[in-house]
Image (spheres, rainbow, N blue to C red):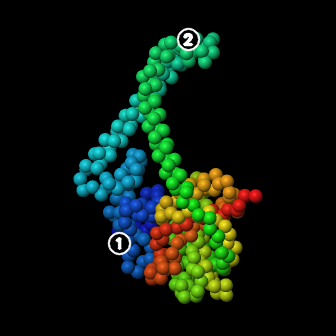
């Protein structure tokens, strides 16, 4: 494993969360590998170099889709095209800022020279009005562009928000694994995966569903957090330490399916619940268990059998917020 870095090493060195690293992999921006006899994902020097390039381009406000086009291009054509477009956007922004500053400065000077007049009257001054046509044209163009972007964003949000299901999760006995510290999903996920393979849960007749949640949520200022996994088991199955046996009471949830990495869609689902005329949030009220929300790792039944060691990779999840019908 000489020259290879773990996910934790790369996360700390580059200041990227482990989930963001997974998301970049999902988008095809970088690749990791698993060394023989080693369960965790590893990054070689070329992958780390590419991640540094991704970070630079993102700081230049380049969208991820265009980042991939630039990095996958053997030449510089895509980079030239994208940078030209960005410079045009920046020039337009600077022109608008300059126009706004000029008018603001003129208003300030006028107010200082006529401080005894109400500010509202000064706004109708002919000298000020003479400056406005140029600003108005520039502003209206920018306003129109912003309006188009807002409409596009709203249409995208509405499309996402319509993809919400109301599901009932049945009560179940679960084996729980929790880890607090760096890469908590990886550690807790491996504990559950080892247990599931040892017990051959796919042969027990259990529904074999895998739920997870932050335990607790990451602090607002950033830092370490915990994650807890639950895998459904038969009621009479013994659970060895450090795992614990728990009872999941089930309930009604608003569900939204995502690809691994698209965790920003939590905000869309929360907005859908908040704006729902039929449902209210029915959570725990505590960040210690992610307010009662869950992430179900879909098709775990197949994934665990196809992965002889380590934590199975999950392609799709259900985001789940507990809800109840409004009175």
Disc 1 target residue: 2
Under circle 2, the secondary element is helix
Placement of the C terminus among the 4 image quadrants: bottom right
29 vs 118, left or right, is left
Where, quadrant-wise, is the N terminus in this rendering?
Answer: bottom left
Residue 81 seen in the figure: yes
Viewer-closest of 162 and 57 = 162
Nearest to the observer: residue 104 or residue 16: 104
Mark 1 crowd level (few <14, some 14–19, many ≥20, 10 Å Cα)? few
Residue at 55% over, 55% down: 161
What residue did someone put label 2 on?
Answer: 113
From the viewer's perspective, tell me whether residue 91 is left or right of residue 190: left
Residue 93, image x and y in percent? 42, 34
Of the residues tagged 2 and 1, which is closer to the observer?
2
Residue at 48 percent across and 64 percent down: it is: 259
Residue 178 lies, with reference to residue 126, above or below; the image says: below
Q: Position of residue 258 (x, y in %)?
A: 50, 63
The answer to whether residue 98 is above or below residue 62 is: above
């Amino acid at each position: 494993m000489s020259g290879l870095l773990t996910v934790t090493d790369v996360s700390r060195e580059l200041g990227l969360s482990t989930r963001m690293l997974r998301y970049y992999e999902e988008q095809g921006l970088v690749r990791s590998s698993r060394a023989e006899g080693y369960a965790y994902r590893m990054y070689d020097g070329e992958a780390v170099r590419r991640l540094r390039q991704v970070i630079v381009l993102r700081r230049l406000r380049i969208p991820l889709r265009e980042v991939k086009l630039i990095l996958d291009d053997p030449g510089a054509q895509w980079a030239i095209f994208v940078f030209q477009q960005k410079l045009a956007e920046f020039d337009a922004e600077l022109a608008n800022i300059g126009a706004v500053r000029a008018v603001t400065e003129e208003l300030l000077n006028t107010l200082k020279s006529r401080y005894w007049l109400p500010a509202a009257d000064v706004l109708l001054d002919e000298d000020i009005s003479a400056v406005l046509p140029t600003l108005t044209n520039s502003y209206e163009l920018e306003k129109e562009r912003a309006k188009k972007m807002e409409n596009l964003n709203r249409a995208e949000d509405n499309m996402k928000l319509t993809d919400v299901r109301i599901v009932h999760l049945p009560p179940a006995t679960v084996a729980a694994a929790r880890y607090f510290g760096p890469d908590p999903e990886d550690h807790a996920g491996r504990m559950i995966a080892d247990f599931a393979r040892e017990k051959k849960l796919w042969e027990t007749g259990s529904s074999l569903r895998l739920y997870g949640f932050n335990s607790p949520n990451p602090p607002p200022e950033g830092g370490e957090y915990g994650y807890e996994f639950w895998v459904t088991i038969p009621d009479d199955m013994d659970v060895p330490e450090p795992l614990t046996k728990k009872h999941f009471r089930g309930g009604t949830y608003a569900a939204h399916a995502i690809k691994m990495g698209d965790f920003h869609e939590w905000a869309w689902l929360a907005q859908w619940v908040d704006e729902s005329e039929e449902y209210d949030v029915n959570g725990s009220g505590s960040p210690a268990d992610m307010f009662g929300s869950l992430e179900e790792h879909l098709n775990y039944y197949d994934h665990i059998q196809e992965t002889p060691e380590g934590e199975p990779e999950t392609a799709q999840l259900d985001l789940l917020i507990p809800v109840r019908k409004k009175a």
